[in-house]
Structure formats: C-alpha cells, structure tokens
Amino acid sequence: MTLSGKARLAGVIGWPVGHSRSPRLHGFWLQQLGIDGAYVPLAVRPEDFAAALDALPKLGIRGANVTVPHKEMALALVDHVEPLAARIGAVNTLVVRDDGTIEGRNTDAFGFLENLRRGAPDWQPASGPAVVLGAGGAARAVVAALVDAGVPEIRLLNRGLARAEQLAADIGGPVRPLDWQVRADALDGAGLLVNTTTLGMNGQPPLDIDLAALPGTAVVNDIVYAPLMTDLLNAAAQRGNAIVDGIGMLLWQAVPGFEAWYGARPMVTDELRAFVLA
C-alpha cells in the first residue's frame, strides 16, 4: 500500500540487522490489515544505541524491536521497564508513550509459551519437570515463562554452571541448576525438554544429548529455526515424542509489539509462517 504523511512507523534495532526476519513478518501484517504504516530495519552500532533510542520519539517512531547486541543495554536506558522484562534482564520491545517516554517490554516469554501451547495442545505445566538447555537471554525468558505457568520443577543445564546458577537466582521459583554432564540423566521423568542454546543451528556444533531417559509422553521444543527441523527434533519425532519447532516463538513474540504500535492485533497463521520461512 502507499504510505501517507500519517503513517505509523516502527522497526527493529540491531547490529547487524540484515538477517532479521522481523521486517518481513511485520510487513506481511501491515499489508494484510491494510494499515498505513511501515516497519524498517535499523542498523545501529552499540556505541550509537543510546542516541538512537533518544531519537525515536523525536522522529515520531512509535517503537521498535530490539535484537542482539542491544537487549541488555535497552533495559538500562529506557524510561520505564515492565516487571517481566526486569526479571528476565532484557528488553526486546520498545513502546514510545504519548508523553514521549519509552517503555521497555519483553515479549519472548509470551511468544515461547503461546508457541508451545499451540504446537503441543496436550502439554500441561503440571505434566512433569521441564528440562531447559542453555542459560542465555532466550533461556531467561523461557524459564520465567515456565515458572509463571506453574511448572513444578525446572532443571536448568548450561555448559557453564555459574551462569545457570545466576539465572536461577535472578528468576526465582523451582529452578534447579545442574551440571551439563548430567543432561541425559536429567531427562528422567520430564514432561518437557527445551533447547535454547545455539547448538544444532546452521553453522554451529551439534547438540549432543541422549534421549533414552526421556518419557515418550514428553514434549520436545527447539527454539532454533534455522534449520526448522533440527537433529534434536528429528530424533525426538523418531521416538514418538511430540515436537514443537522454533519459528512460532518468533511469530508470537511479535504480536504484542505490533498491536502496541499499529493499534490492531494481528493473527499468527499458517500463511504467515510459510511467508516468513520462504
């Protein structure tokens, strides 16, 4: 559609940002809903991030997504931080308020849980312990989501135990940091396995984990989506476990930001999924 002088503007800030699928995702919704607006990639170096943030309200930009390496810096610089973003320790969504101040939110926990519930509708938080691999920014959102959903125990394994221990202390709740070497044993009795590491991603080392102890009723979710079907998901599917791939988390985490910037709540559909993956 043709933009007018009243077009609503938003974007994604990162360095680099050329790999981001967010412009394609939000562009699909803008076109589908016939909204007078645009969503653009904003390549901002780390040393320029504070100035870029300050410029958003001055330029009439309604907000932005924040991607690597700016998520932690955004948390420290915004005027207001929602409680969940403060717990997670990172901001991925900026909303410019009517008074020109900027609110920092984190929608990754929402995106993870919506993707999990829709991809595996039979999964219930009370179905057993969750095993989470990794302790980075994505893991913090995943663990916060699982704690808030009421999962009785979260077994957290990271290649560096200290980082897992710090995550557990920050998020709170029934989180048990465990040594990476016991990851196979930690699967015993679990109702859910989530990989939040980059292991298994294109160009990264494989994820080495023996699934023998994982119950057949457990759900396996890999938040990696390049490739869409990781070795972990293939191995889980072959043994009969329900699997959930990672692209849905990207799609669902975008919904609250789009609604805040453009005033309409978009739909996550198979058509959108296919378009973003193409």
Image (spheres, rainbow, N blue to C red):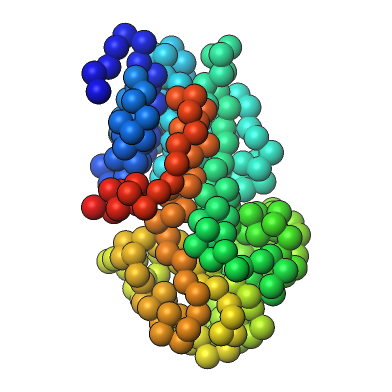
Which residue ends up furthest to the top in the rendered image? 5
Residue at left offset 69%, top offset 73%: 127
Q: Is residue 69 visible?
A: no
Closer to the camera, 70 or 232?
Answer: 232
Closer to the camera, 144 or 247?
Answer: 247
Q: Is residue 113 left or right of residue 204?
A: right
Residue at left offset 64%, top offset 71%: 130
Q: Is residue 259 above or below residue 131?
A: above
Task: Locate residue 202: give its quadrant.
Answer: bottom left
Residue at left offset 72%, top offset 69%: 126
Q: Report x, y in % for residue 169.
A: 72, 58
Q: Is residue 95 visible?
A: yes
Q: Report x, y in % for residue 96.
A: 52, 21
Q: Is residue 139 left or right of residue 170?
A: left
Q: Report x, y in % for residue 184.
A: 55, 85
Closer to the camera, 150 or 30?
Answer: 30
Task: Locate residue 133: give its quadrant.
Answer: bottom right
Q: Is residue 39 left or right of residue 171?
A: left
How many numbered marks appear? 0
Q: Is residue 32 above or below residue 206?
A: above
Residue at left offset 48%, top offset 28%: 264
Q: Is residue 206 left or right of residue 185?
A: left
The quadrant in which the N terminus is found is: top left
Q: Is residue 151 above or below residue 247?
A: below
Q: Is residue 6 above or below residue 26?
A: above
